[in-house]
Image: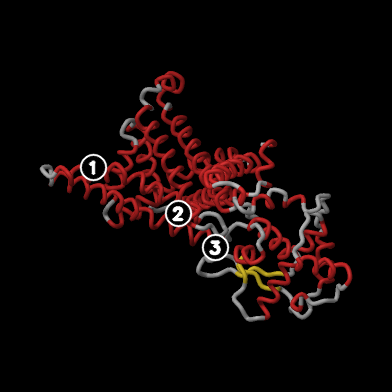
């Protein structure tokens, strides 16, 4: 990618429409590849494969327990068996473990151990997924345990109903098609919807995952194209797995009756790689305009980094003094024209310096930031002394800028340490 570094310096205003489109496509793929390499995404895919294997039975146990309570567990069982129709041994094994799990958790001492193991596996899986997505988005802080339990258990409670609804839609379309065999147009239309509906639900699921899983603001429009690409590749891999696993007889010779397990793990590994690639593509879409700055944000000079911290603190103090709703990281990044990831890192440092305090919203919104000290006591000197005691490193790279507001802050940094940030 060394030869492609100059693409960030190209003046797009001088390019034609097709050239700008080609340049944006190249930039997206460069961002995706650089970040996949930088973030070690393949390692996260391996960790998620292990967590998924560990959580398969507990998750299905929750789904089946809720489904049985409402009387539609047979629909979910039919859906599970149809997913493994070419290798029913896997479905039988999974259902056997699920039944055993539910039988043992009905009473006795095992119920306490079973619930603890259930909570551990679910929180472990969801935490690993969130950590992978936060790494992709350069988010340093994950959700609290309380929010994880509330948010993710809500998903697991809703999941059985989603499966029933999607299965019901498929059954309705099949029934409607058989009732109208003589009307060729409607029959073909129903057949088309039957074939397209799994792809549609897969794309919708990836859109929700890419939007909601990272602990940051993700614009839904940036997830549309990555979700379509991810859903297409995922459905293709699933089709290959379902229809060709019987033909892979070499595994049977090596693993015997356990041949289904390595194939299932291989499918999980590939699926997570596809999912994380799609998430990285979403990041590339959203950070296309700021990545040129973001890719060298770790090399900022100490003076420039101090200036950015003072700028953020000044905006937050003025916002608080005006009685406005506290800033989120994304809103502050938009207001200052800085990359979301850099603003998130600096806000985390300011929180560690005890200059800011994070506000957790009970409705699950993004974190908001308020001054931790009386704004009439927060001076330039106080902030810079906190920075010094915090031990921020001093890289050698100097980023040049001509923004007047930053120039003023540099002067204050050196000549007027007693100035209040709220008065800047």
- Relative to 94, does residue 72 appear above or below in the rendering? below
**What SS does tag 3 mark?**
helix
Percent of width and height locating residue 376: 77, 80
Tell me which numbered mark, 2 or 3, is placed earlier along the sequence. 3
Disc 2 and disc 1 in contact, CB within 8 angstroms: no
Percent of width and height locating residue 99: 35, 44
Give whichever of 302, 389 is nearer the camera: 302
Q: Which of the image's four quarters has the C terminus? A: bottom right
The reply to whether residue 69 is visible in this rendering is yes
Label 3 packing within 10 angstroms: few (<14), some (14-19), many (20+): few
Tell me which numbered mark, 3 or 1, is placed earlier along the sequence. 3
**What SS does tag 1 mark?**
helix
Q: Which of the image's four quarters has the N terminus? A: top right
Residue at position x 58%, y 41% in the image: 26
The reply to whether residue 310 is visible in this rendering is no
Give the residue number, with chain letter if any, for mark 2. 208
Describe residue 377's horizontal placement relative to residue 210 as left or right.
right
Q: How is the image coloured?
A: secondary structure
Give the residue number, with chain letter if any, for mark 3. 146
Percent of width and height locating residue 206: 45, 49
Residue at position x 68%, y 80% in the image: 321
- Relative to 120, does residue 86 appear above or below in the rendering? above
Percent of width and height locating residue 397: 81, 50
Give whichever of 357, 398 is nearer the camera: 398
Residue at position x 62%, y 49% in the image: 14
Give the residue number, with chain letter if any, for mark 1. 191
Residue at position x 72%, y 52% in the image: 297
Q: Nearer the viewer, mark 3 or mark 1?
A: 1
């Amino acid at each position: 990618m060394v030869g492609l570094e100059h693409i960030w310096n190209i003046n797009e205003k001088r390019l034609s429409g097709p050239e700008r489109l080609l340049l944006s496509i190249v930039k997206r793929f460069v961002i995706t590849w650089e970040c996949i390499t930088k973030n070690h995404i393949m390692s996260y895919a391996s960790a998620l494969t292990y967590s998924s294997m560990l959580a398969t039975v507990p998750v299905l146990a929750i789904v089946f327990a809720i489904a049985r309570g409402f009387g539609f567990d047979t629909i979910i069982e039919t859906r599970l068996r149809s997913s493994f129709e070419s290798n029913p041994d896997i479905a039988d094994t999974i259902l056997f473990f699920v039944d055993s799990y539910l039988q043992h958790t009905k009473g006795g001492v095992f119920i306490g151990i079973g619930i603890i193991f259930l909570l551990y596996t679910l929180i472990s899986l969801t935490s690993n997924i969130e950590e992978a997505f936060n790494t992709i988005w350069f988010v340093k802080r994950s959700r609290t345990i309380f929010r994880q339990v509330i948010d993710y258990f809500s998903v697991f409670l809703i999941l059985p109903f989603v499966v029933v609804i999607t299965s019901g839609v498929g059954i309705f379309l099949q029934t409607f098609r058989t009732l109208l065999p003589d009307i060729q147009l409607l029959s073909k239309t129903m057949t088309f919807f039957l074939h397209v509906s799994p792809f549609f639900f897969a794309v919708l699921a990836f859109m929700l995952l890419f939007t909601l899983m990272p602990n940051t603001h993700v614009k839904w429009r940036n997830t549309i194209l990555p979700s379509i690409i991810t859903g297409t590749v995922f459905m293709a891999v699933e089709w290959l797995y379902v229809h060709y696993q019987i033909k892979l007889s070499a595994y049977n010779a090596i693993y015997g009756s356990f041949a289904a397990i390595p194939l299932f793990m291989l499918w999980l590994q590939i699926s997570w790689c596809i999912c994380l690639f799609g998430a990285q593509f979403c990041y590339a879409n959203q950070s296309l305009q700021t990545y040129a700055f973001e890719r060298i944000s770790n090399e900022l000079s100490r003076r420039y980094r101090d200036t950015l911290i003072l700028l953020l603190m000044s905006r937050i103090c003025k916002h608080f003094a005006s009685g406005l709703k506290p800033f989120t990281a994304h809103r502050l990044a938009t207001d200052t024209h800085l990359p979301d990831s850099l603003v998130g890192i600096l806000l985390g440092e300011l929180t560690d310096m005890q200059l800011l305090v994070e506000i957790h919203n009970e409705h699950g919104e993004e974190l908001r930031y308020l001054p931790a000290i009386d704004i009439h006591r927060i001076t330039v000197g106080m902030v810079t002394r906190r920075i010094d005691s915090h031990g921020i490193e001093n890289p050698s790279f100097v980023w040049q800028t001509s923004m007047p507001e930053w120039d003023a802050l540099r002067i204050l940094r050196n000549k007027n340490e007693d100035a209040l940030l709220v008065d800047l």
